[in-house]
Image (cartoon, grey):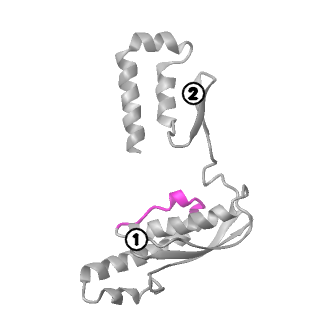
Amino acid sequence: MRRKVFVVVLVFLIVVSSTTVAFASLGDMSLKALFKSFIRYDFDSVKEVSDKNGELETEPQNPSPSETVHKDGKYTVESKPDYEGYYSKATVIIKDGKIKSIDWNIYDSKKRVFDEAYEEVFGNNQHYREQCRKDLSGSKIYGPKLIQVQNIDEVDAISGATWANKKFKEVVKLALEQANVDN
């Protein structure tokens, strides 16, 4: 997002500083339409830009997650372990093209499940025990939130539970890749 804002501001300043050149090359397109097109421009997913009805339009390379159609079925996946040995497993059920249920857990390198009892792994280290509780509380929210919004990119991390959010998104994206109609 920062990159987009920076580019928008940079382009706007270039356009403003070279008003004569910009207006000469715009033809029927207004400065407002040009600026609006840069605000909407998604630099990570744009394939090409075409002039349509006086405004620039973008053509995404891939459909957004909310536009993706999923095949009905039960998809069970496992992520790769991270540098500390933590990995996730998930089972996602798709019915009528929609996510109906998600069962997921995080595991450590010794295959211990990340649950209410897991904080005992950290012994007397209160900082890690508290962090464990926060991540666990987030991990319980993410599945129902995804079922509600049907878009993995709209499942925001809750404060203190970003690690669990990353683990959740990583493993659910693997399941949804299997469920994509394009596969």
- Image vertical order of residue 105 relative to residue 183, above or below: below
Residue closer to the observer: 90 or 9: 90
Q: Residue at x 39, y 38 (%)?
A: 5
Residue closer to the observer: 77 or 6: 77
Q: Residue at x 55, y 12 (%)?
A: 27
Residue closer to the observer: 111 or 118: 111
Q: Main secondary structure of the magenta part?
A: loop
Q: Which residues are magenta?
A: 149-159
Question: Is residue 104 shown in magenta?
Answer: no
Q: Residues within 10 Å of mark 1 (few under 14, many from 20)?
A: few
Residue closer to the observer: 7 or 157: 7
Disc 2 + disc 1, Cβ < 8 Å: no
Disc 1 residue type (three-letter): Tyr
- Image vertical order of residue 36 relative to residue 84, above or below: above
Of mark 2 and mark 1, the one earlier in the sequence is 2
Q: Quadrant of the C terminus?
A: bottom right
Q: Which residue is mark 1?
A: 83
Residue 108 in picture, x, y percent from top left: 44, 81
Q: Which residue is mark 2?
A: 56
Classify mark 1: helix, strand or loop. Answer: loop
